[in-house]
Amino acid sequence: MRIVFMGTPDFAVASLNALLAARLDVVAVVTAADKPAGRGQKMNESAVKKFAIERNLPVLQPLKLKDPEFIEQLRSFRADIQVVVAFRMLPELVWNMPTHGTINLHASLLPNYRGAAPINHAIINGETVSGVTTFFLKHEIDTGDVIFSEQVDIGPDETAGELHNKLMETGAQLLVKTIQAVQDGNYTEQPQRQSDDLKHAPKIFKEFCEINWTQPAQQVYNLIRGLSPYPTAFTTLQGKNIKVFKAILVRKQPAEAAGTYQTDGKTFLQFAAQDGYLKLTDIQFEGKKRMQIEEFLRGMRL
């Protein structure tokens, strides 16, 4: 089958690479438009675009997915199926174009954790398992009939970045399996369960990332893990923001008020939560580079 691939970040690159390695016929790639980034505002290309160019694949970068010129270009590739991995919401005009429809790879075990940040929210909520799911797109986001899913364990100290990398590789192989099954007609579609108790994964905004030290220590620890390395949990210290990439959970009832910090000025800095401490180990102070706590304390008077 002729495949048009749609994706933007590194997570999607692994899937595109797996499709090519399996000798599946990717005829074009659709990705985000170049954007200015950094101090010099240099135009930045998406990870998928860079990879596609290396592999000599045609690349489309529409600003608007309903643009008539883009629609005509997309139609000219005569795709039998489209594949979406970490892209954006598609209009029906696009996802309904190929004969076999459009398949999406989602980084959760659907129907739980529909939305923009499934990896983050799974860890924030203290889940011990996650996974990846392939499904056919339809009108409502992340609600299409499931083709395959595969479970992945979450370690007790695992960060969102670490889970991201595991799901990226597992998802890439599941996508290959899915395309091959659709080619062979060897699959069944399972409607997603509809329920009021489903867990969701909405987009994460800055205010959500601020640590609330009055919460239980495990909950704070999960927030730090679930937001590391991006967008990163933060707290304040001496009136400035401090990003927290990693911490150690200390299960000891604090004698101090929640949010109070203790340090020896050399090797440790810890904050009191409701029922334990979080010993910060990997941080970034406002205006500084990311560093280990020992390096930070050498240059900071607390």
Image (tube, rainbow, N blue to C red):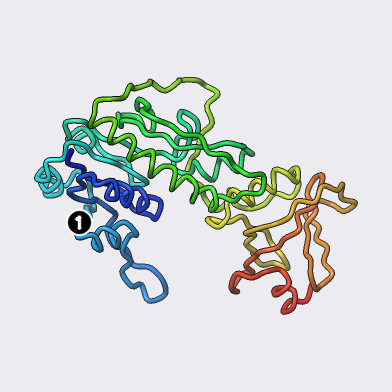
Q: Where does the N terminus fall, quadrant-wise?
A: top left
Q: Residue at the spot x=31%, y=56% of the render?
A: 48
Q: Nearer the viewer, residue 20 or 74?
A: 20
Disc 1 target residue: 57
Q: Residue at the spot x=24%, y=53% of the render?
A: 63
Q: Residues within 10 Å of mark 1 (few under 14, many from 20)?
A: some
* In this picture, residue 95 sits left or right of residue 297: left
Residue 194 position, x and y percent, is 45, 20
The residue furthest bottom is: 299
* In this picture, residue 259 sits left or right of residue 55: right
> Quadrant location of residue 141?
top left
Residue 185 position, x and y percent, is 24, 25
Q: Residue at the spot x=30%, y=60% of the render?
A: 51
* In this picture, residue 65 sits left or right of residue 194: left
Q: Nearer the viewer, residue 258 or 248?
A: 248
> Quadrant location of residue 181?
top left
Q: Nearer the viewer, residue 282 or 62?
A: 282
Residue 179 position, x and y percent, is 28, 36
> Quadrant location of residue 134?
top left
Q: Where does the C terminus fall, quadrant-wise?
A: bottom right
The kind of residue on which mark 1 rests is Leu
